[in-house]
Structure formats: C-alpha cells, structure tokens
Image (cartoon, coloured by chain):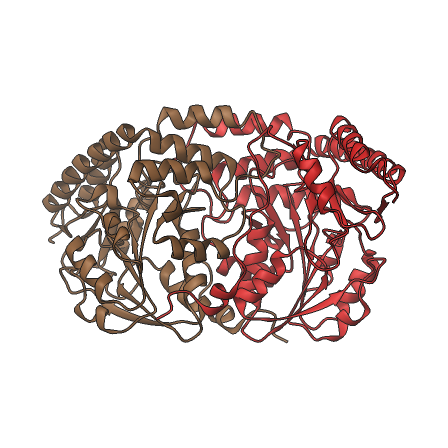
Chain colours: A brown, B red
Amino acid sequence: MDTLRRVVREMAGYVPGEQPPVGAFIKLNTNENPYPPSPQVLEALRKEIEKGLNLYPDPLATSLRQTAARVYGVDAENIIVGNGSDDLLTIISRACIDSGDPVAMPTPTYTLYDTLVVLQEGIHHYFPFPPDFSLPAGIKNLGAKLTFLANPNSPSGTAVPVTQVEELARALPGILVVDEAYVDFAEETALPLVARYPNLVVLRTLSKSFSLAGLRIGLGFAHADLIHGFLKVKDSYNVNRLSMVAGCAALEDLPWMLANRDRIVRTRERLCQGLKALGYGVHLSRSNFVLSYRGAERQERVYRSLKERGILVRYFDAPGLENSLRITVGSDPMTDRLLEEMGSIVGGERA
Amino acid sequence: MDTLRRVVREMAGYVPGEQPPVGAFIKLNTNENPYPPSPQVLEALRKEIEKGLNLYPDPLATSLRQTAARVYGVDAENIIVGNGSDDLLTIISRACIDSGDPVAMPTPTYTLYDTLVVLQEGIHHYFPFPPDFSLPAGIKNLGAKLTFLANPNSPSGTAVPVTQVEELARALPGILVVDEAYVDFAEETALPLVARYPNLVVLRTLSKSFSLAGLRIGLGFAHADLIHGFLKVKDSYNVNRLSMVAGCAALEDLPWMLANRDRIVRTRERLCQGLKALGYGVHLSRSNFVLSYRGAERQERVYRSLKERGILVRYFDAPGLENSLRITVGSDPMTDRLLEEMGSIVGGERA
C-alpha cells in the first residue's frame, strides 16, 4: 500500500525560501519589512509572556477580531484570524475546493495557490497576465469554483484597479479570494467590497506592513456565512497567545505602520531610479518589492553574485521569469548597498 | 453555485472548547498544566522579542528539530514540527487520505480525527473500546489507509500497552498515527518503535507536560520518507519565531517538566481517591486527567453546578459518555476545591 497520496508523492519536493540566521545577509528576498514592529507590540509581548502560557489561546481569537473589526470598520463576524494568511489560504481551499472543481488564477503569481489546488485535486486554470500585468480578460468566463487574485500581485508587484476587481466579483459564480498581503503599499483596497459581494474574500497579513512576519498573523474578511464555514475547517487553536496580543497591539498603533509604509514607498522610488540607471526596467510597483529585468538577460548570475556579496534577492527559475529579479524594498542604507553591488556586477556591461 | 463544499456545509458548526479569560475559572476542562513553563522558556522569549520579529521564521524549524533530535535520541530528519499537534494531524490527513480511503480509530477518542477524515472524504470506521478500554480487537483487520490511536486516550485517560501498539504497527498495511499528547504522564512510549516501523508516526505536544498550550508546538516522529512527504504539505511558516525558541528552551529543561509531571501524577492519585470517596468510579488514568462516573447517573447537572461555582470540567454529550465527567488534574489546591464543591453537590445523594 502506498502510504502517501499520489498527489503528494508527485508534488515537487518542498523548497523553502532562503531564511538564513538573523543578520547573516542583507535580506531582500522575501519581502519582509526592514523596520521593527511598534514598541507597543514588544511591550504587549513582554506582559503576555509573564502569564497564562500554560493555557490554550481563545479559539475564536475574539480580542483580535474585535480590534480588527474596529480598525477596518466591519463586524467581528466578518473576520477570521489565521496563523499567517497562508493558513487562511489553506482553510479556504479545504472549505471550497472539491475534487475536479475548476480553480482560476492569473500567472505568474504566488505559487502556494497552485499547491493548494493540487492537494484538493481541483483543476487549475492559468490565465497568463499580459505584459502590462493587467487583469487577464478570460478569467471571468471560466465559471471557476474559486479564483485567486493576489492584488498587488507577487512577483510582479503590480496591481489591478479595484473597479476591475469589483467587476470580477460580480461576474464570478464562485468565490473570489483577493489576497491583499501588500495592499498597504498600494493606493486602493477591495475591502469595502466585502459588504456588497457575498462571494468575495479579502485577505490581509501583518507580516509585511506591520513588520510581524516572525509571528504569523493573517486576517480574512468575508460575509458571515463564509466565515462560519471557514471556522469549521480551521484548527481550533491556530493562533497562539503571543501572536494574538501582538496582533492587537500592532493594529492599535496604525501610525507606526503608516510611517514605515511611507518610508518604504519613498525608498521604493529611490530603488527604481537606481535600477533604471543600471539599465534595468521595472514593473510599476504597488508593493514593497520591485520586479526588474535588464532586457532579456538572464539574471541568475546577478542573483548569485549578490549572494556571494552578502545580499539575498529573489531569482525565479520559472518559465517567463528567468530574466527577472524580485527585490524587496529595504531601508535606504540596504538599498544603497544593493545598488552599489549591482553596479559593480553589471556596471561595465551593456544592458 | 454552492460556495462551500458539501462536506463542509453538512459538518456540525464549530464548537470551541470553553476558553474563558485567564483567571475567570478554575480550569479543569482542557487538560492544561496548572504549573507555568520553565523560567528558561520565559527568558528565551524575552530575548527573542527584542530581535527579528519582522523576519520570517525558519520554515524547517531546524534549531527545534535538532534540539528534539538530541533530547529524544533520533535524527532531525525523522522530525516534523507543527503549530501544535493538531496542525500535524491536519498535515498527516492531507498527506495520506484520498477520497474513499478507509480510516480506522477506536472510539470514543479525540474528535478532531473524525473531522479530518470528513474533510478528506475518507470513510471512517469506528472500533468501540471494550469497557476496560483495551485495544479493540478488530481494528487491525480493516486494512485501513490510516489508523489513529490516541495513547493515552482521551477522554478515557487509559493507555494500551506498547507491545500491543507494536503488534498493531506490524499488522497494519497503512499508516498508524500514535498520538502521545499525554505520554509524559504514562509509563511507556511507542517512540523507539519509529526506528523499526516505517508506517508508524508518533506525535508529541509541548502543550501538556511542558506547560505550553498557549504557544502551539507539536512534534511528529516518523521515517524520513514520511517526514519528507509531510513537509510538502505543511504551510511554509507554520511555527513562529517565539514558539520555536520557547520549544527549544522547554526541551532543554527536562527536569522542570519532569518535576511538574511528578507533582501532577501525585495529585492524580489524590483526585482519584477523593472521587472514589464521593461514590465515583474512575478509569485507570495514564494522563493528566481522569474520566469518572457515578454509576449510570447523568453528569450534566454536576458539570453545570460546578461551572456556577467557578470550576470548569468537561462534560461530553456524546453517546456513551453522558454519565461521565473528564476532570483535568490541577494543582493540589485546585483539586481540593473541586472535591469540596463536588462533595457539596453530590454529597447527600446515593451513588
């Protein structure tokens, strides 16, 4: 008897992102925030570790849902909390995808969506982004059970207008998941649409703009009926006590997040200018990273040279992305150092 | 179009365990440890919150796997870390159960197993424990793809001998998951069998004996091939930075855990004696809780009266369990208070 499912046996081996020890590299490869979380988060954590770690967390994450409800102007019954938004993506796929169900997504995009479809034995339908990364026209006509849209998208960093997201939600017979992991670095959000479209799920994470990648806190917003179904699927105690209080404290200190967001958006402009000066093109970024290319030149060598010099960026081997580097927007000093090293690597070459 | 899967729509609504605010009740309902985790855990957490929360955790939990490997005498490649052992149960079910696969479990047992089978559209086969909670004889003959055995079992608190677990592992064509959440309160473990049976998975948790229910840390032990498959299924960043360092520190301070374990085992004896004096019978507990009954008397009234008096225990409405209370072994003062209140509730009555 085969002990593992066929789909699992045939899945590609697990390739974790590069997560070296803290401080070993200038990390510009997984879109983390270069600034620390709010001091209020650290204070809340210091207090919480003194009490109650021997007790289970609240399975419904009531305090965090109430805080998020207040901050985002919705009801707590419209919110589910995940162990990162990856956990929410897993929950949604397990709640919605039956074997053989059609699932749509533009590509290239976040590769986890595909893994989740495979595990549920859904049928993935890929809709390649056009070169300007606008919404692929055919995606609304498939009749998909579930449609994933990362907006802003990764790895492109681009965003489609919310008016188009709304048209998509209206046109789709199934659920539309709008993954807004990077939305705090963008200009607009689909969150207000949740009140009008019962098939719309908007995901947020505190990993990027709130500087809490290390703590795994995701928020899902949807109609109460959908949330009710998702709660049946999630592990009872999926969010731990420390993440819960950290999430509340982070949401309570929006000015801290917004100040970091503003700094990152300014540095993003500096990064784009610097890349252009080196002969790179950049896609219009609405996120905290930039997808850049230098004509059709393969970028693996640049990625490797940067790594040798202590800087990690993201190089994708996937078809259509061999000529691209995805570079997280770090602090100004990190960005200056990156540009300096890239200049010395490609400086003397023709683009 | 139905947005949720039929199996999810038809599942019972999510009923979380009662997790009131810290200090609101004497909590003897979810088998938490009454004692705090090691001071070394708190110290490790205090240090970790000062650094790197903006960065993702190590997706392979290398430091925690290495520490657990040393403590338990296995290789790190034989270990997977979960966001609690619930996460590991979810991962295993998604990795192993295809639609229609037979899945076996003795009953009554931990109800999450059943939920996971339903979500995977497996076919559950229940093997009722005999009155003495010994291993149901027929369970080895089903030819199940996956068999769940909580040992010690919940809610009974009883354990089957490891020699019988070994016979079961040898007889089964599929995977045997031995959930040892409570094993530190028992006399023997199936962990050494992992080296001999490639179809055996042993699960541990730091929630009970290590006093870390609030942080969600589970450990899975199995043959490297199985672990490799499970790693494909798990969310990349399922264990956060703080849980990771807390887990390492807790495992490094085994004497702290063992001292608490000894105290709890002593109090368990005191609890059993006290219950017997009140006319209760108790199943032989190898865990940190006791399943007790008073003849065929329904225990819902006792549960409710205790709750009114500020004490939470676990009452199961499920068939065959209406006459039972599952009572966590707390500290001596908590146990004395429980027995006093139970005495005043049932004291004047005939058993």
**Residue A181 percent across, percent down from the top left:** 30, 47
User: Can the viewer see residue B16 in this picture?
Assistant: yes
User: Along the line of sight, which residue is nearer the eye, A95 or A45?
Assistant: A95
Residue A212 percent location from the top left of the image: 38, 37
Judge by depth and name the residue closer to the eye, B149 or B274: B274
Q: Nearer the viewer, residue B153 or B56?
A: B153
Give residue A206's quadrant in the image.
top left
Left or right placement of residue A187 versus residue A149 in this view: left
On the image, which quarter does residue A198 sit in? bottom left
> Residue at image x 36%, y 32%?
A250
Q: Is residue B250 above or below residue B293?
A: above
Left or right: residue A179 compared with residue B256: left
Give the residue at x 56% y 24%. A50
Which quarter shows the N terminus of chain B?
bottom left
Residue placed at 27% from the left, 51% from the top? Answer: A195
Asked if residue A19 lies left or right of residue A210, the reply is: right
A123 over B224 or under it: above or below = below
Residue located at (55% from left, 32% from top): B21
Relative to B16, residue B259 above or below: above
